Image: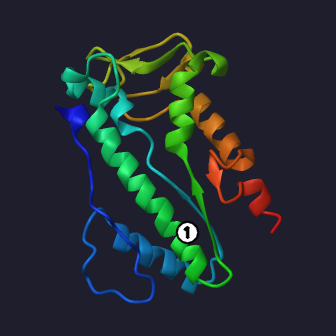
Amino acid sequence: MYGETTITEEVTCDVGGRDGSNKGYGEEEQCNMGEKLYDMGARKILVTNVPPVGCCPFERDFNQHSGEVCVKFQNLLVQKYNNQLKQMLKELTNTLKGSTFVYADVYHIFDDIMKNYGSYDFENVDSACCHMSGLHSGLAPCLPHATICPDRSKYLFWDQYHVTESANLIVAKRILDGDSNDISPINIHTLSKT
């Protein structure tokens, strides 16, 4: 049932004129924020997309029908949102003279880490290092009496929602120096030289 759902609503960022017709996922507010940053003098703006939230331990445990895999419906929503966000940032860059809105695709980066976790030296990408309850340690927050894994650098997730420092370092490096699959239209290293 969840894996079969598709999201079809289209969203545009009508830069320069608001008619109130776009009331979807906060895209109008994001367009306004991009314009506000621009009006305050910002010209180089990094925006990260949403990671695959259907893969976090909480979603896996809360949606037990997903079994050992990520929750497809949540990830479909995220992918739809991310596609619209990327389009909006392109539109803002094209419309706001001299601006560069950079899109960091953390969804792609985390998806790559989960599919190729061994090459990143991870041993566990579906359960939390700090665990109390749930198959994936996602049903309770990380509290003082929780059990901590012996080596957090081997886990993608620290707790039911948040990734470990090891994962954040990988994401940061790929945003700084990554190719167009990770960040577009240019990476942060290149952006800093423009």
Dot 1: within a 10 Å radius of its alpha carbon, few (fewer than 14), some, or many (20 or more) residues? some
Question: Disc 1 residue type?
Answer: Lys
Which corner quadrant holds the N terminus? top left
Residue 69 versus residue 47 in the image, above or below: above
Q: Residue at x 53, y 75 (%)?
A: 92
Indicate the quadrant containing the C terminus: top left, top right, bottom left or bottom right: bottom right
Q: Nearer the viewer, residue 105 or 41?
A: 105
Quarter-of-image position of residue 6: top left
Taking the view exactly as shown, the residue that stands out farthest to the left is 1
Residue 183 shown left or right of residue 28 in the figure: right
The residue indicated by pointer 1 is: 90
x, y percent for residue 4: 23, 35
- In the picture provided, is 36 more to the left or to the right than 13? right
Residue 103 vs residue 84, the one in the foreground:
84
Q: Position of residue 120 (x, y in %)?
A: 64, 22
- Indicate the position of residue 3 as horizontal and vertical percent values: 25, 32
Residue at the top extreme of this rendering? 150
142 lies above or below 42: above
Left or right? Give the position of 122 relative to 143. Answer: right
| Residue found at x 49% / y 81% | 36
Q: Is residue 114 something one can see in this rendering?
A: yes
Residue at image location 21% in from the left, 28% down from the top: 62
Determine whether the residue tagged by mark 1 lies in a helix, strand or loop.
helix
Asked whether residue 128 is in view, the answer is no
